[in-house]
Structures are given as structure tokens and as C-alpha cells.
Amino acid sequence: MIQTPTQPTVAIAGGGLAGLAAACALADSGFRVMLFERRPYLGGRASSYEHPGTGEVVDNCQHVLFRVCTNLVEFYRRIGVEDKIRWYDEMTFIEPGGRTSVMRASPLPAPLHTAPSFLRFPFLSAKDKFVISRAIAALTLTSQPDTGRSFLDWCRRHGQTENAIQRFWKPILISSLSEDLDLISISYAAQVVRESMKSPAARHMGVPAIPLTELYNRAGDYIRARSGQIRFRASLETFFSEPTQVKVRVSEAEETFDYLVLALPFDGLDRVLPETPEAVPLREKLTHFESCPITGIHLWFDRQISDLDHAVLLDRTIQWMFHKSRLLATRGNAQGDSGSYIELVVSASKTLIDKSRTEIVDLALKEVREFFPEARTANLVKSTVIKEVHATYSPRPGIDAYRPQQTTAWPRVFLAGDWTATGWPATMEGAVRSGYLAAEALMVACGMTDRKFLVPDLPASGLMRLFAR
């Protein structure tokens, strides 16, 4: 057991969700936390800022959660922002031309609760629905290990029609995992399906009703209220682990702490690792990770173009529409007819990376007018495009073998990040889990093995209780 002072100190590098979760848990457990963030704001890839070209506060990308994200929900409750999440139990699908279909729960027990609305979907044929239902049963009720093959290969081997792939599997899984179907592992796809089917509550979608950085500033307040500190524009350069302490170099200055949590993206970790033999295995694992981009397209119209808060868009480049002028409005007040501010999301947006802002806005405007007839007569007031080139890691077949645990070769140094071995893909839930796991590992190093931060998964209900794993 490592001996520590009465109130040990811990440095946390990274102010994204993983770092904030670790910092809040440790600050609440009596540690003196110092969080270093290279940006001037918190939230990492889930952040917002005043865009200089528009004068508007924009999120770098729309982030949503589901009730199945139990640790994220607990984190929001911990920092006091649970009431800033707007929950929805319906999901609207729109086809080009404007025809809508709504998925909602019925009184049937899980996993049959969405069957009635699914069976009424006009954009899927009877054959599509039959093969999809058979696939959902296989993914939900039987083990689907990572075989090294992609989910697209699995679909074709399990008789999925091209229409089922394009209009069902792609909208669901590319949005969830931010990768193309031919690069998604079977096990990740199965996890998404299984978790969403385990109970009617699991698929309830939550959308922040305030800008993301405002949401995560509450975590900063939580840390400071427990004697922690946050230093912005402070980038960790490297560290030196010793038997009784860890020295960190931040902005060319050296400071000493009892512990260090590296809550950095995988593509930013390599540059801070020391040039020592202990770092070699971790560096080798990092070489197996690749990034997936997400693009957010922000459009402001001079009039209301839809009465929907959000929608899944089929058959086009854009995958989701979030009606921000409604989502960010006070509950019960959708800002009248003063205009529409929408954010369009394209996950796995590799085809957009090399396109100019003008090209992307023109494409988005053309597609929006296909889905929302009211947009055809609306004037575009302003727009911007935000490309998150390194938004997530690619959930490729075999990647789990390279996701590291929270402990490292240095006894006083721990890892956090959605790309670490959390048991979840690259989601906000995965990020929070990684932060809590890092905090738990650090507590074990202190000899406090009874302190746990992870909360239980959402329990299965209905018939799904027979297949709970």
C-alpha cells in the first residue's frame, strides 16, 4: 500500500468529461484536486463557445444521452444539473419529402415495447421489418463477441436487406458509434441494440437545455467548493513518476503531486508520456487507435421551419436535426415564430472534412429544404460549420484488445478517457465511467478499497430480465 498524507494531492490533466468525473469523485473524497485544462473552458469535446463569425454561443457538436447512461445521469445529479436535461420518449424519422414516422413505447414488455410503432414504419417493407426483427433478437438475446469482422459483414450474413441497412441500421449505429458500418465491430453494435432494448426507459433521450460549457461549469464549481482548483490555458507537457510523488511539467513550470490522472484523448497522450521503457507498451497500444470525425452544421433561419425539437433524417448526408431555438428555450416557451436555429449533425463525416464551409452549408440547406417544406420559403440569416476531426475513436473490430486499463506502469499515475477499457464505446457515458474507474483505482492505491463511484447499470425489465447479463 502506498502511504499518503492526510489530504493527498492529485493533478488531473484534461477538463473533458473523463477528467471532470475523476476530479469531482476525488474532490468529494477528501483529495486536493488541481485540474489542468489547455483550453479556456471546460467540457473538452463536449463544449460550447461564442463563435466569432456569428456572435452566437454554439456547441462544438450536439451531445445527447439516454436513460441507460446511468453514470452520466448520476454525474449530472452530483453536480446539480440534472434538471437542465430535457427528456424525450419519442423519436421522429423523416424521409425526403417530409413524411414522418414516430417510434414510441407501448404497454408491451421489453423488448417488445417499441414493436407496434416499428411495425407501422412506412419507410420499411414487410421483408425489411422481418429481417430487422430477427437481427434484433439475435443481437439482444445471444452473445455477439468481436470476431474480427465488421457489423456490415454481419448484416449481410444475417440476411439484412439493403433498405434495412440504409434506413435502419445506418441511422441508429452511425449516430451512436460515429463510424461506418463496415468499420464497426459486431460486439459494439450488439451492445448498442441490447442496452436500448433492455427496458422502455432505456431509450428515453436526454438533450441539454443549456449550452454545454455552461453545463460543465457546474462541475468546476463543484470541484472548487471542495477546495480544488482549475487552471485554464495550462497544458501538461510531461511527468516524472517517483516512488513517493509525481512531478508534472505544466507550461514549462514543474509542480509536485501525490498522484496524477491523465484524462487526455488517445491522440494527445503520446506527447506527454516520458521517454522511458515503462511507456513503450502504452505507446504501442496507442498506435492501434484511429479517429472518427463529427461535423455540426449550424443554421439560423428568419422563421420557424418545424415544430419538432429533433428528428432523424433518412437517405441523405445529414443524420440528425436538433431544433436549438426550441431546445434552449425555457420549458413551455419555444420562442414563438421569431425564427429557427437548428444544428445538423453528421457522424463519421469523412466526406465533409475536405469540403469548404460554403460547400457544406449549401449541401445542408438543400437537404433541409427536402425534409422541411417550411424551410423552402425561409431565408438563411447566418450559418457556421464546426468540424470535430478527432471526435471519437473508431470502434473497429479488435480494438478492445488495445484499450488500456486505468492503472499504468507508474503506480501513482492513472488513465481516464472514453477510449480506455470502460466496457462502453466512445460516449459521454464511457467518459464518465473512465473517470470514475480512474478514481476507484487511485483509491485502491491509497488503501481505500471500499470506495466505489460507478453506479449500477439500468436494470432490465419485462422479458429482458430473462436474458440479463
Image (cartoon, rainbow, N blue to C red):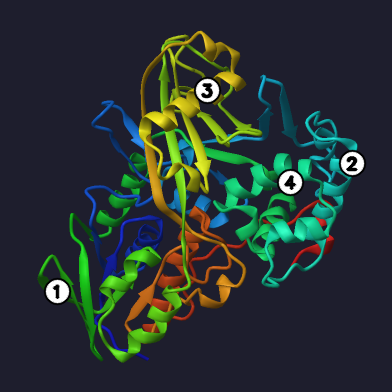
Q: Secondary structure at mark 1?
A: strand
Quarter of the image that includes the N terminus: bottom left
Residue at figure coordinates x 68%, y 31% from the top left: 93
Q: Which residue is mark 2?
A: 127
Q: Which residue is mark 3?
A: 366
N-terminal of the two: label 3 or label 1?
Answer: 1
Structural distance between the alpha carbons of marks 3 and 1 = 54 Å
Structural distance between the alpha carbons of marks 2 and 3 = 31 Å
N-terminal of the two: label 4 or label 2?
Answer: 2
Of the residues tagged 3 and 1, which is closer to the observer?
Answer: 3
Q: Which residue is mark 4?
A: 165
N-terminal of the two: label 4 or label 1?
Answer: 4
Structural distance between the alpha carbons of marks 4 and 1 = 53 Å
**Label disc, if present, on residue 255 of the rendered structure:** 1
N-terminal of the two: label 1 or label 2?
Answer: 2
Tag 3: amino acid: Lys
Place of residue 361 in the rendered image (x, y in percent of width and height, measured from the top left)? 42, 28
N-terminal of the two: label 2 or label 3?
Answer: 2
Place of residue 62 in the rendered image (x, y in percent of width and height, measured from the top left)? 46, 39
Q: Is residue 246 above or below residue 70?
A: below
